[in-house]
């Protein structure tokens, strides 16, 4: 791939697992398994290309309304992922952070998440944020409530400083797979000036070539942040 302008921080809404499975006459849980397998590939390839921080939307606050069987399967996949990724994170110098309300998860999943975060917290390389039980609106409310408790003035800057991703900067690019054209409550505050890239490709089929298409498109954008260039 020719040298291009690479975004520092990329967010991905990983959509389309269920439809991918349906097209193959398989249960939605099969699609989620394939989608989970794709996380490692895209994470590795994004970091290889120069992306410093990757924020993946894995499970929203609204996803609890899905059938219990599907939710249970997703929780199981998350547990397996974090168990598997602990060693990889340390080896690859990747710092793993989970953003969202973790208190609602089972004690076992909470422990696995904590172990992964603790094992990688001193890593100085890339950052992988995984958004689970996450909602952008809820994150803003959380930030404002934290400021009220501290007795601090509520400003654009102070809210930004109390978001989950405050240390990572705002996403330069947000990618959504699966053919939908909305953010679905993902990084609502941070993404105010993010470049948006939508593709019909379902998440399990989103490979290195599709990632390059998104990065190539980003490189063509003229980011003005409300000004004139």
Image: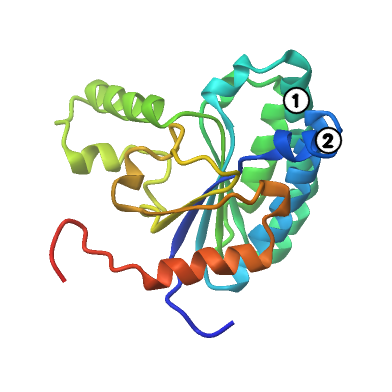
Q: Is the residue under label 1 in contact with that under label 2 (CB below 8 Å)?
A: no
Quadrant where the C terminus is found in the figure: bottom left
**121 up-or-down from 153: above or below:** below
Q: Nearer the viewer, mark 2 or mark 1?
A: 2
Of the pair 229 and 81, the residue shown nearer to us = 229
Residue beneath the point at 62% across and 59% down: 94
The picture places residue 15, in percent across and down from the top left corner, at: 61, 40
The picture places residue 65, in percent across and down from the top left corner, at: 61, 15
**143 up-or-down from 118: above or below:** above
Residue 67 figure quarter: top right
Residue beneath the point at 62% across and 63% down: 210
Q: Secondary structure at mark 2?
A: helix
Mark seen at residue 156: none
The picture places residue 33, in percent across and down from the top left corner, at: 80, 39
Q: Secondary structure at mark 1?
A: helix
The picture places residue 163, in percent across and down from the top left corner, at: 36, 38
Label 2, label 1: how far apart the Cα atoms are: 23 Å
Crowdedness near tag 1: few (<14), some (14–19) or many (≥20) residues, C-alpha within 10 Å:
few
**98 up-or-down from 51: above or below:** above
**Which is more N-terminal, label 1 or label 2?**
2
Residue denoted by label 2: 30
Relative placement, left or right, of 137 versus 155 is: right
**2 up-or-down from 85: above or below:** below
Residue 70 figure quarter: top right
Crowdedness near tag 2: few (<14), some (14–19) or many (≥20) residues, C-alpha within 10 Å:
some
Q: Residue furthest bottom?
A: 2
Residue denoted by label 1: 108
Residue beneath the point at 29% across and 52% down: 193
Of the pair 128 and 20, the residue shown nearer to us = 20
């Amino acid at each position: 791939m020719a040298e291009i302008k690479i975004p520092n921080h990329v967010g991905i809404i990983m959509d389309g697992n269920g439809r991918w499975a349906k097209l193959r006459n398989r249960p939605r849980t099969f699609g989620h398994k394939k989608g989970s397998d794709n996380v490692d590939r895209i994470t590795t390839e994004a970091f290889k290309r120069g992306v410093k921080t990757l924020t993946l939307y894995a499970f929203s606050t609204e996803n609890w309304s899905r059938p219990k069987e599907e939710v249970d399967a997703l929780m199981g996949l998350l547990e397996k992922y974090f168990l598997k990724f602990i060693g990889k994170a340390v080896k690859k110098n990747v710092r793993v952070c989970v953003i969202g309300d973790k208190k609602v998860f089972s004690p076992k999943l909470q422990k696995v998440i904590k172990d992964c975060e603790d094992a990688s917290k001193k890593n100085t390389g890339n950052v992988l944020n995984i958004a689970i039980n996450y909602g952008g609106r809820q994150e803003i409310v959380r930030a404002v409530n934290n400021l009220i408790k501290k007795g601090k003035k509520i400003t654009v800057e102070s809210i930004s400083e109390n978001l989950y991703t405050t240390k990572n900067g705002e996403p330069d690019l947000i990618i959504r797979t699966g053919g939908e054209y909305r953010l679905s409550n993902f990084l609502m505050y941070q993404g105010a000036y993010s470049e948006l890239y939508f593709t019909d490709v379902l998440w399990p089929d989103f490979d290195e070539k599709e990632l390059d298409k998104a990065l190539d498109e980003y490189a063509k954008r003229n980011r003005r942040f409300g000004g004139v260039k």
